[in-house]
Amino acid sequence: MMGAERKGRKREYVFVFQVAVLLFIGKQAFAQIRYAVPEEAKEGTAVGYVAKDLGIEITSLSDRRFRVVSGSKETFFEVNQNNGALYVHKKIDREELCHGGGACIMELKILVENPLEMHYVVVEITDVNDHFPSFPENEQKFEIGEQTLPGKRFQLHTARDPDAGSNSIRTYTLTINEYFEVDIRQSDEDKIPFLVLKKSLDREQKKKHALLVTAVDGGKPPKSGTLNVSIIVLDSNDNRPMFSQEIYQITLHENVPVGTSIFRINATDSDEGTNSEIEYSLGKTLKKKVYDIFELDKLTGEFRVKEVVDYEENDVYKLDVEASDKGMPPLTGECRVIIKIKDVNDNPPEIE
């Protein structure tokens, strides 16, 4: 029994030594065979008839313990000892196995005994278009001043697609509109999209733009992902206050009580914020008597009587009024207010 045990151990040592020698001399000992199989191939899918390609008799496969020597915990491929085929033992996810867009290669060791041989088989896992392009966020917002000149570029989020080669991102498209277009810059392996302003914005015409950017891969059929883009147009002070009329005419009885509200003017400004806030003022070149008799509220545009109005002294007053916004610099609008004084029988006849 002791002798038999020693002989068994000796055979085992010889076998291990032979394997070590084969591993040491490596790929130079036997020609490599190369196969390709698409990822996600079903379990049992034949990759290639490796025994035939290696010139090994099919009938001897079982006796010679024809098998794959796996160097990893997971065995993705096995050989069929009945027909010598290399087949998929476990479904492969290329993106999980190999990161990046380069070739995904698996190197297998095929071992046969009696006599002992080690063969190397290379299997390339080819990509399948099984992923959709995706953006890191669903929406991207920009605030763009309406004074921004055409040609200005705004970088968009870059979509990612873990597929490789022609199945990766190919292009970006943008919903048809008159203000923006998409431009693509190639950077290493990435295509970086930019939103380009092609026409000046006008907040008074449209204060918000909603666009859709689509990333498209090169698969057949192609897959795509979308990004919602919102553009808020920021106001610039490009509109002056406007009165509803250039000339206002009103009639006022003389001797109206002091403090009476007689008229209210109104101007509008289509800008927003402080660019649309209006203050009113009387022209700077009017006769002093006008400032003594009438006052104008700078915020409301309301005219009031400050002093008694006398038809016999003056029967008409012509006032220049200015509306100014609070932009930087401010813009102004002008109008004229004509106040006609109506006579009241407030004087007795005089006898000369």
Image (spheres, grey):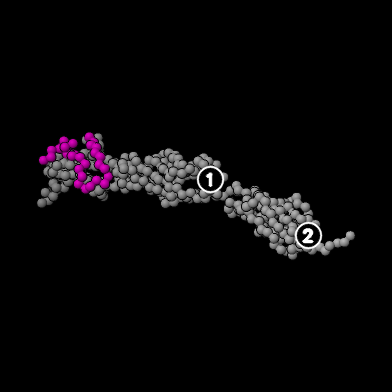
The image shows residue 12, relative to residue 307, as above or below, that is above
**Left or right: 342 with respect to 56?**
right
Magenta-colored span: 31-59
Magenta span contains residue 47: yes
User: In the rendered image, which quarter contains the C terminus?
Assistant: bottom right
Q: Earlier in the sequence, mark 1 or mark 2?
A: 1
The amino acid sitting under disc 2 is Asp
Q: Secondary structure at mark 1?
A: loop
The answer to whether residue 252 is seen in the rendering is yes
**Left or right: 124 with respect to 280?**
left
The image shows residue 349, relative to residue 177, as above or below, that is below
Magenta span contains residue 171: no
- Residue corresponding to mark 1: 201
Residue 72, given in percent of the width and then of the height, sits at 26, 47
The amino acid sitting under disc 1 is Leu
Residue 335, given in percent of the width and then of the height, sits at 67, 51
- The image quarter in which residue 279 lies: bottom right
Give the mark toward the camera: 1 or 2.
Answer: 2
| Residue at 36% across, 46% down | 224
Residue 140, given in percent of the width and then of the height, sits at 46, 50
| Residue at 41% across, 42% down | 172
- Residue corresponding to mark 2: 310
Q: Residues within 10 Å of mark 1 (few under 14, many from 20)?
A: many
| Residue at 45% across, 42% down | 182
Q: Residue furthest front?
A: 351
Distance from the alpha carbon under mark 1 to that under mark 2:
54 Å
Front-most of 53 and 117?
Answer: 53
